[in-house]
Structures are given as structure tokens and as C-alpha cells.
Image (spheres, rainbow, N blue to C red):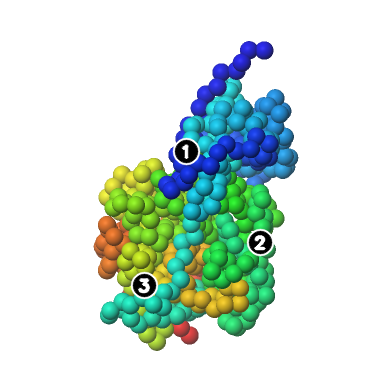
Amino acid sequence: MARLQKVSLKGTEHTPMPGARAIGPTSPHQIIEISVILKHRQTLNLAQHRGQTLTHSDFARMYGADPTSVDKIKQFARENNLQVLERGDEVLRRTVTLAGTAADMEKTFSVELIGFEHPDGTYRGHTGPIQVPEAYASLIQAVFGLDNRPVAHPHLRMRNTNRTFGSRTATTTYTPVQIASLYDFPRDADGNGQTIGVIELGGGFRPADLQQYFQSLNLKTPPVRAVLVNEANNRPTTPNSMDAEVMLDIEIAGAIANGASMAVYFTTNSARGFQDALSTAVHDQIHTPSVLSLSWGNAEETWTQQSMECFDQVAQEAALLGITVVAASGDQGTTDGLPGTKNHVDFPASCPHVLGVGGTRIVSANGVIQNETVWNDGPTGGATGGGYSNLFQRPEWQSAVATQPSRGVPDTAGNADPDTGYTILVDGEQLVVGGTSAVAPLWAGLVARCNQMLSARLGFINPSLYAINQNNGFRDITHGNNGAYSATPGWDPCTGLGSPLGSRLLQALSTATGKPVSRAQTGEAAYTGRPHSAA
């Protein structure tokens, strides 16, 4: 039998992580699981379905993987001594899961798998591109799992009680309920009937902690279900672990949209894990989330092109299914934590089909915001991420505000400074936490409230947000900077359009979507440039 000609899959090349040291070849007997992502049966077309939400069955029929392609990839696996792990959703999620030894994976995909040691832990990696026979390459969008390096960081910041700020020594602690009141979130809504999905790349939660936390706020404990993706688990340990991120997300979103249910998708911190978790959440027909909160990310330059493009495709799938995806823009300013002074934006906040959220610092009195600025506590204290993408072009809906031809980040903002931070409970310990990690579940909770009030899913919300008059939905942040960029009137790469004026934003979205909501329903007070005081 003639040897099949192989071709390289675009955007699959890796380089070792900075600071990584090769420690030798991967054992040829090690069992590896991978996800092969197939191409859509036709090009995604959001414009064709504008104002329409597809069902999962309609999506599978129109845009899912071609069943013939699924069968061919399964045959390809068998030809190469790889096992097919049947999941039952291969057409819908366009994902075929395969398992096999490292030796068979190396031979099948023409890569050399090397073990690396890194300060973040050991990982398995490869440097060259993934290769497959030309006949199969035309069917494949991406292959994840051969390289399992950690890809993302949680974007949260603990309050540093040892740090001094000169004129900014005063600190304030808020509950999520107080922040929702300061931002004038619709008072007659609690997210009833909605499910908020949260993606976590580590950590865990304890139901007893959640019960204690919500009781302390005089709220009921919302239903919270763990959904395990690939080899992950809900595994809580200590307060200084990734549990803080998990509890921050659940407690903020659950307090703001206390009538909603929550599904927490635990996955591994790898490109495969993040991709599979997003795809699982978007196509989850059991929990059916209407909004997803993502508080993990990393600079675009640390991802492969394959990862970013494939992730954005699933974000587009979410849009077609009426799911809003919210992502934190990072907490290390305009360098996004990379060495040097070059500007970088955080992914997945830079996805054009994701609502990227930045961070602010608020000063309030008597239940009213007196002042709000860009969150920037300097090199060691953290600052909101923001800037312009090096991969994604400027979307049409951003063309009137962004001055560069690239996707601008963030789109919106909210309170993120740890010194005006959120009180949460983690593994029995009370902490005060900030970072743009807090803003993602904040906005997810607001979207859930708006969905309830509109009796509809807002879905891909970005075009609507940029189309409304900024004063009708946002407090424009005009003071402060995040490093290379300064806040200006209108949209800017620090806080985007600004922080939410919740009730006014709901009214504007009601008009934009054609879903009527009366001003009496929103609980809106007469607008004076600031939200109303807490009742």
C-alpha cells in the first residue's frame, strides 16, 4: 500500500514555554487522549440568522460536522491503531475523541512528544506542526491534546493589606448585591429561568461554603452543578488555591442573579481542556446555559493560531444558539504579563464574538457611585487589560469607535480593584478579591437578569451594545490608564464603552431587540448622570 502524502495543519506549531526545560521523550507507552475538531458542514453565517436563535437540532443539521466526515476520521483512527471514544455528540460538537499510546500518536501525526519542566509544572509538548494525510486534512479544523501545556491564568487579585497607596489608602469592601445596586441593575429581576455557565480550569467548590455565603447575604443558595469535562474534577483544597477563582465566579454571579441556576464546567488547564469545555457548555442540552462566564486567559502570543481561531468559531456557535459569552480582559495592564514593554491583549477576551470586560475602581457614598476610574494599581498591584488584537481584525460593529484596524479590547467594564473589592468565602475563609475575574460573572449576572426581563436571550450582545447611545447604557470612564492607553470620552482600550447603567441599558436593549420592557419593570429612577441609591 502506497504511503499517503501528509500535509501540515495550519497554526499548530508550538515553541517551548518561556522558562521550560526539556527533560526527555514522552514514554512511548503513555496513553494520550486527543480531540479532533472537524470543519463545519457549511460556513457559519451569523448575519443570515440575525435576530433568530437556532435549536441544537437545527444547528447540527446546518452547521454541525458532516456525518460522513465523522466516519472517515474514525476510520483514520482505526487505521493508525487509535481507539475511538464514542461520546454521542460528534456531529453537534464536531469533536471526535481518540486515545492511544504516545508512540502511535507520534506516528499518526508526525510529531515528537517531549516532556518539559516549567515553574507552572511539567507538561508534554511538541514544536513542529501536526501533520495528517492530505485526504483527511481537508476534514479537520484542529487537533488538541498532543501538547498539554497550561495555557491560561485566573484573572483575580487578592487585596494586599501590606501595600500603601499614598492618597489612596482608603479601601472599601462590597458584596455583589451592593455592586449590583450601585450599577442600578434591574431590581425586579433575579435571573429566574436562566442558567449561568462558568468555565473553570482548576480548583473546586464546597456546597457548605456556598450555603454559608448566600445565607450571610440573606439569599437562597442557587442550584450549582459541577459538569466534568475530560479528566477534570471538582476538587477544592485551600483558600490560596484556584478555589478562590471558582468561588469568586459562583458567588458573584449567584448573588447578582440569585434566581438563576449555575453549571460549573471543570476542565484541565490546556488548549484541549479549554476548547472542549467551551464546546461542551455551548452544546449542553441538559443545563442549557444562556450566558457563559470566562475568568481565565493569557496573552494572545502564548496561544496557537489554531486554538484562537477554533475557540472563536465555538463562540460564533454560541451566538447562533443565543448564548452570551463574557471573558475577563486580564489584570496585568497592557503588557498582559509578558516581559518587555510591548503591548499585548488577553485571549479569549480578544475574540470578536466574546464580550470582553475590563476593570475599574469605584468610590461611593450613601449607595451612589461618586467617582469611577480605570483600575491601575501599578506593576505589582495589577491593572485592567486592554489594547488591540494581533490576530483578529476590527469587527464591523466596532468600526465607529476603534481607531486601529484590529479588534479592540475590552468592550465594557466594571468594578475590579481589590481595594474596592468583593467579599467572598473560600474554603471557610473570608477573602476580599478583585481583578477582571470579578467583572465577568458580574456581567454574566446582569445578562441573566436582562434575559429574564426580556423573555428572550440576548445572545451575541456586542453589536447591540455598540449601536445604542453610550449615555443610554454606560457610565463613560474618562480618567486613568492601564499602561500604554489612557481613558478618553467614548470607547477606549481601558474600560471599553464604560461600566453599566443597568436599568437604562436594559431599556436600550429592549428597544434594540424589539422586546418591550416598561420603565416601571426596570425599576429605573430618573437619570441624573448616576444610578439611583439602593432602596
Q: Secondary structure at mark 1?
A: loop
State the separation of the CA atoms marked 3 and 1.
38 Å
Report if residue 238 is visible in the image.
yes
Is the residue under label 3 in contact with that under label 2 (CB below 8 Å)? no
Q: Quadrant of residue 218?
A: bottom right
State the separation of the CA atoms marked 1 and 2.
30 Å
Q: Quadrant of residue 222?
A: bottom right
Residue to which mark 3 is pinned: 361
Residue to which mark 1 is pinned: 14
Give residue 232's position: percent from left, percent from top.
65, 54
Q: Nearer the viewer, residue 354 or 42?
A: 354
Of badges 3 and 1, the one in the foreground is 1
Q: Nearer the viewer, residue 178 or 30?
A: 30
The crowd level at tag 3 (other Cα within 10 Å; few <14, some 14-19, many 20+) is: many
Q: How many marks?
A: 3
> Which residue shows up at 59% across the image and 41% down it?
145
> Which residue shows up at 50% across the image and 31% down it?
129
- The quadrant of the image that shows the N terminus is top right
Return the disc, 1 or 2, that comes first in the chain's sequence: 1
Q: Give the answer, above or below, for where 336 lies relative to 309.
A: below
Instruction: Name the residue at the bottom extreme.
Output: 366
